[in-house]
Image (cartoon, rainbow, N blue to C red):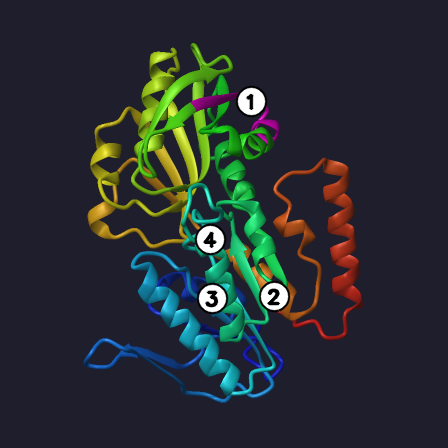
């Protein structure tokens, strides 16, 4: 994309500027000029340094740790752009924080994911673009359009090409992840298993049983996020005790908080493959962690949103080959017939 008047404008806060820059490079446009800093007492200061009146604007900001700071940066950026008369504002959240607080699972607790959705909407977002929500129903928390991308294509390509694993069984870490695991197993032509666990606290879980055959096989645990790594490390231990040869993991969002680094270092996990939706600080990086970039996927989604094209081919995590070919042909036809398209 060339930085013309009809091209989108990308802005970012301080959450993951490297990711935003990678998206901008993929689109061949510069990042927008904005000041996102702090006053002396710690209040967030935002100023948009270029004209955005009537423009299609995208704010790239994962609400990753420190979650509250980055969420406030996002909200203030949205408000500033709305007051600057941007035509449409899309909040691009590679990682949606507070997603685990999506229901009342005990008395007198909030549904914080819904609260955050309301805040983003009221702040000025016209639509949201995100990836691998912790719970799919969070899409319904928004009263504005939401496009939900999946990292499955990126992981499957990696494990089918660069890291082909023989005798593979895909493992869901819990009952809620069985649909995702089944999609991976189908596309990797692997068997399927599931960890039956009992949650002790919000950070710890105890494995009760392994459902499925893992003895003598290499296991791939798939999940949407790894926080303190307690559940993942416990699953690895149980899989090894059940006879698994090597255990790998593919996890979209590497939160890696608290004791995660120490737990992963001491575990038998062979490799943890993650995406770059969240930056990993140098003091939390490990040799067994492999980072795959989803910036090109977000760039293509932004291009399609800007040009009012279908995102179907991007956000379906699994389908049959016939449906995929049909979608490709429809997308190509739409691209050829769209007079507003932006040439690369």
Query: Left or right of 201: which side holds 130?
Result: right
| Few, some or many residues within 10 Å of mark 4 (<14, 14–19, 20+) | some
Q: Mark 2 or mark 4, which has the lower sequence index?
A: 4
Distance of mark 3 from mark 4, alpha carbons?
37 Å
Q: Which residue is mark 2?
A: 303
Measured as percent of width and height from the top left, residue 204 is found at 31, 33
Q: Which residue is mark 3?
A: 25
Q: Please state which of residues 332 and 51 is positioned toward the viewer in this rendering.
A: 51
Q: Please state which of residues 240 and 273 is positioned toward the viewer in this rendering.
A: 240
Q: Is residue 66 magenta?
A: no
| Few, some or many residues within 10 Å of mark 2 (<14, 14–19, 20+) | some
Helix, strand or loop at label 1? It is loop
Helix, strand or loop at label 3? It is helix
Q: Quadrant of the C terminus?
A: bottom right
Q: Please state which of residues 152 and 235 is positioned toward the viewer in this rendering.
A: 235
Q: Is residue 194 magenta?
A: yes
The residue at 44%/56% (across/down) is 112
Measured as percent of width and height from the top left, residue 63 is found at 39, 60
Q: Which residue is mark 1?
A: 190
Measured as percent of width and height from the top left, residue 175 is found at 51, 29
Start-end of magenta stretch: 185-196
| Few, some or many residues within 10 Å of mark 3 (<14, 14–19, 20+) | some
Distance of mark 1 from mark 2, alpha carbons?
34 Å
Q: Which residue is mark 4?
A: 111
Answer yes or no: is residue 332 visible.
yes
């Amino acid at each position: 994309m060339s930085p013309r008047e009809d091209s989108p404008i990308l802005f970012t806060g301080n959450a993951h500027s490297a990711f935003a820059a990678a998206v901008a490079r993929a689109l061949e446009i510069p990042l927008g000029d904005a000041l996102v800093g702090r006053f002396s007492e710690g209040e967030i200061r935002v100023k948009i340094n270029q004209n955005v009146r009537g423009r299609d604007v995208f704010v790239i900001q994962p609400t990753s740790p420190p979650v509250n700071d980055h969420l406030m940066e996002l909200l203030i950026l949205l408000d500033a752009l709305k007051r600057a008369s941007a035509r449409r504002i899309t909040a691009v959240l590679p990682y949606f924080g507070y997603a685990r607080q999506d229901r009342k699972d005990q008395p007198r607790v909030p549904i914080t994911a819904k609260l955050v959705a309301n805040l983003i909407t009221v702040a000025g977002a016209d639509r949201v673009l995100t990836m691998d929500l912790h719970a799919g129903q969070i899409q319904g928390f928004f009263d504005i359009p939401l496009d939900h991308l999946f990292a499955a294509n990126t992981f499957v390509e990696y494990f089918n090409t660069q890291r082909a694993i023989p005798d593979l069984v895909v493992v869901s870490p819990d009952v809620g992840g069985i649909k995702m695991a089944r999609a991976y197993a189908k596309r990797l032509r692997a068997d399927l298993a599931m960890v039956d666990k009992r949650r002790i606290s919000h950070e710890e879980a105890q494995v009760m049983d392994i459902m499925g055959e893992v003895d003598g096989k290499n296991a791939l645990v798939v999940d949407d996020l790894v926080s303190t790594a307690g559940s993942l490390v416990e699953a690895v231990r149980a899989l090894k005790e059940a006879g698994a040869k090597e255990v790998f993991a593919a996890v979209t969002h590497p939160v890696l908080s608290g004791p995660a680094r120490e737990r992963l270092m001491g575990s038998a996990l062979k490799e943890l493959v993650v995406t770059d939706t969240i930056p990993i600080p140098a003091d939390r990086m490990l040799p067994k962690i492999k980072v795959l970039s989803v910036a090109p996927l977000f760039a293509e989604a932004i291009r399609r949103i800007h040009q009012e094209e279908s995102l179907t081919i991007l956000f379906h995590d699994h389908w049959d080959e016939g449906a995929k070919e049909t979608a490709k042909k429809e997308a190509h036809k739409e691209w050829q017939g769209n007079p507003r398209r932006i040439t690369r």
